[in-house]
Amino acid sequence: MNGTRRADIRPGISVMVELAQDKRTGRLTGGTVKEILTSSPNHPHGIKVMLESGLVGRIKKII
């Protein structure tokens, strides 16, 4: 799963996200989903979430 469908995401799962400051660099940050911020059912660049660490980014990979 690549993180573009909201139905695949739920709080507590481990993911790799691309933070806003890391756009176009390819750098990913790992963490656990705390809250889903995207309201639409899917998003081509990844669902935006808040990690338990407080960081916000778009999901690129579900671990």
Image (cartoon, helix red, strand yellow):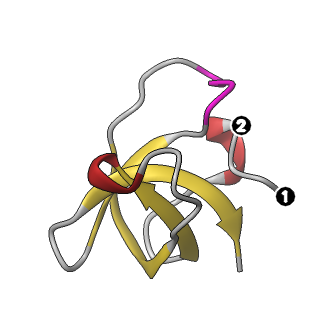
Q: Label 2 amino acid?
A: Arg
Q: Secondary structure at mark 2?
A: loop
Main secondary structure type of the part rendered in magenta = loop
Q: Which residue is mark 2?
A: 5
Q: Nearer the viewer, residue 6 or 30?
A: 30
Q: Which residue is mark 1?
A: 1
Q: Does 37 sit above or below residue 57?
A: above
Q: Residue at position x 31%, y 46% from top?
A: 20
Q: How many marks?
A: 2
Horizontal side, residue 24 vs residue 8: left or right: left
Q: How far across and how far down the image is residue 44, in percent?
A: 69, 25
Q: Disc 1 residue type?
A: Met
Q: Is residue 41 above or below residue 47?
A: above
Name the image quarter holding the N terminus: bottom right
Q: Look at the numbered disc 1 and give the secondary structure of its residue.
A: loop
User: Residue at point 60% right, 39% down?
Assistant: 46
State left or right for residue 9 relative to residue 32.
Answer: right
Please give the range of residues in magenta.
41-45
**Residue 19: x %, y % from top left:** 36, 56
- From the viewer's perspective, is 38 left or right of 40? left
